[in-house]
Image: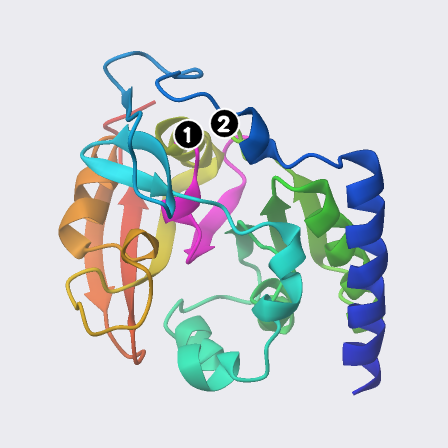
Amino acid sequence: MIKTFLLRGFLVIVSALSLLLNPFPAEAFSFAGQTLGGAPETYQQRSLHHPDGIGKVYMGREIAQVMGHQGAEWLERSSRGIEEQPEAAIAALNLKPTSVVADIGAGTGYFSFRISPKVPEGKVLAVDVQPEMIDILNFLKTENQADNVEPILGSVTDPNLPANTVDLALMVDAYHEFEYPKEMMEGIFTALKPGGQVVLIEYRGENPLIPIKGLHKMSQKQVKKEMQAVGLLWQETQDPLPQQHIMVFQKTALVD
């Protein structure tokens, strides 16, 4: 209860500072039909796009809007444990005490701080592209006394991870929001050790009855196609969770 109260107070301060420093949302400066970065054949831009998307299309999929740091409290909602069963998800990762785990799109560290005690001789690299989320991660790192959690500020094109250092890269309901998925996955691929794994946990796009916005769900078929494009080999899909796939891929020698 006390930690929740402190987190809410901290979020209010972060949001207030953000508004003072950046009173205009990024959406106010988007231009229809403009493509920023990436080769023309990699991304296409739609001038008329889905209200939940950014109008940018990758391998036939429109990229979803990012949930900003203003939604941080929702990431820590009390119902999330029932809805997503994080302990079952983490158990499926088969972590070792020495594992180095990169939690990409870590947000408030909901998974990072639950993984932390599972890797007492390893560490968790909690990567996010929003400085406000990094502030929250550092605050909660102190609150949780999680010395083996290392918050890392990435960019929309680079997770900012050293090469050949990561045993497992985890993305929980995050990949579908990557603005530059190809570049990010190439960076993650480089960061993986030989034989390292990528695990995506995404709401099942094949099931229209799951009450999540369409662009915030992904099918196995689409994920496999996008991971294969950067040299990741599908190993298995586990479905112990109520609404999400756990999709496991491995680094191969197809891409250096």
Q: Which residue is mark 1?
A: 180
Q: Quadrant of residue 173?
A: bottom left
Nearest to the observer: residue 84 or residue 64: 64
Instruction: Name the amino acid type tagged 1.
Output: Tyr
Q: Is residue 242 visible?
A: yes
Query: Residue 250 at what x, y percent from top left?
Result: 29, 46
- The residue sitting at 69% across, 51% down in the picture is 133
Chain part drawn in magenta = 161-180
Q: Is residue 160 visible?
A: no
In screen coordinates, is 84 left or right of 144? left
Query: Residue 112 at what x, y percent from top left?
Result: 60, 63
Give the colouring mode of the picture: rainbow
Q: Is residue 132 magenta?
A: no
- 1 and 2 marks in contact (CB < 8 Å): yes
Callout 2: SS: loop
* Mark 1 vs 2, N-terminal side: 2
Query: Residue 218 at what x, y percent from top left?
Result: 25, 54
In screen coordinates, is 83 left or right of 42? right
- The residue sitting at 47% across, 50% down in the picture is 167
Task: Check disc 2: other Cα within 10 Å, few if <14, some if 14-19, many if 20+.
Answer: some
- The residue sitting at 30% across, 42% down in the picture is 50
Classify the position of the N terminus by image quarter. Answer: bottom right
Q: Which mark is residue 157?
A: 2
Real-space CA distance between mark 1 and mark 2, rounded to the nearest whole angstrom = 6 Å
Task: Check disc 1: other Cα within 10 Å, few if <14, some if 14-19, many if 20+.
Answer: many
Classify the position of the C terminus by image quarter. Answer: top left
Callout 1: SS: loop
In screen coordinates, is 251 left or right of 137? left
